[in-house]
Amino acid sequence: MVLIVRVVAISLLLQFCAWQVLADEADIGFDLPKGFTATVLVRDVGKARSLALGEQGTLFISTRGPGKLYAVTDAFSSAPQLITIATGLDMPNGIAFFDGALYVAELKRIVRYRNIEKNLENPGEPEVVVAELPFDGKLHAWKYIGFDSQGRLYVSIGAPCNICEASGLAVMLRMNADGSERETIARGIRNSVGFDWHPTTGELWFTDNGRDMLGDEIPPDELNRIHQEGLDFGFPYCHGVDIADPKFSALGHCSDATPPVQNLDPHAAALGMRFYTGSMFPAEYHQQVFIAEHGSWNRSKSAGKTGYRISLVRLNKNHPVSYEPFMEGFMNADQKVLGRPVDLLVAPDGSLLVSDDKRGVVYRVTYHEEG
């Protein structure tokens, strides 16, 4: 009798566990356009942030608070392998792969791991590329980095505040791959945690997070474009197209600021962005802009949350013509937050990868034409 009771108990426990797994899986059911599917590519990546791809197909994943870097080998096979390649780093949010090396932006410096794909199990100590980056406290101090087609390294430097004048901060830097010839190419950028180059024009586009504490509906987050060097995008004096900051409105800087090419939802926390350059998705998505909206934290309950989705900015002749949801389901109908998207990457097969620092996973969005 005791044995039977134990067997029944174990059976019920297994059923409960199975139900719990199914319930967890159901929570990540996403709303996507017809023909698109989202699956989990890799799990157990605590606080997954930025994504980068190596020459041999290795997927690199950064974290922020945990201070870890991960690599995923055989990422697009049935048995991807997750490897921890570094620990104890100082908020290594920004990563980029260039010339065989993984570049990593910490709070105050940039390092690189040479020949990283040949040494994933034992990468050794990194080489310091930039010993000192602008820094004034940890607010918005995590960096985002990337290389242009000429091999120049770009680094976003956030403002150390919600709203303030910040000399030498709130800028976009550019330098050679060895850290030399550093220059500021744009300023007035509050907190950019995502940028990409237009595949045809080569111009740099980036997201920017608007300030807090002006209300539920203003200011917008922004999608911006650097079409020439030396542009000022307004912070802290001007937000969006023409919203003068009440603290600095007497200075009248809106007329001098470069407006965004597209206003994004207020407080949506627009982070990673990518031009779609793959061949898997339908032609209408080619060279369109996908944006990871991490999600709001300080809107009133009555106003509801914004973000918690992947949005799509459609372009016509390189000019935005619409802004719409593409992938929803990171929060449920009751606005319970289930996940928070951070960065995006177009995989070699044309699928779209999405990191989620709440669930610690990377999703893979694929398209299959329905018959």
Image: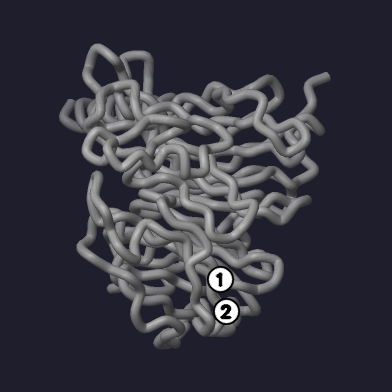
The residue shown at (46%, 47%) is: 233
| Crowdedness near tag 2: few (<14), some (14–19) or many (≥20) residues, C-alpha within 10 Å | some
The residue shown at (30%, 17%) is: 304
Q: Which residue is mark 1?
A: 153
193 relative to 275 in the view: left or right = left
- Image x and y of residue 123, in percent: 47, 83
Q: Which residue is mark 2?
A: 176
Which quadrant of the structure image shows residue 313?
top right
- Image x and y of residue 113, in percent: 49, 81
| Crowdedness near tag 1: few (<14), some (14–19) or many (≥20) residues, C-alpha within 10 Å | many
Image: 303 above or below 45: above
CB contact under 8 Å: marks 2 and 1: yes
For the N terminus, the image quarter is top left
Image: 140 above or below 175: above
33 relative to 158 in the view: left or right = right
As rendered, which of 300 and 277 lies closer to the eye?
A: 300
As rendered, which of 263 and 285 lies closer to the eye?
A: 263
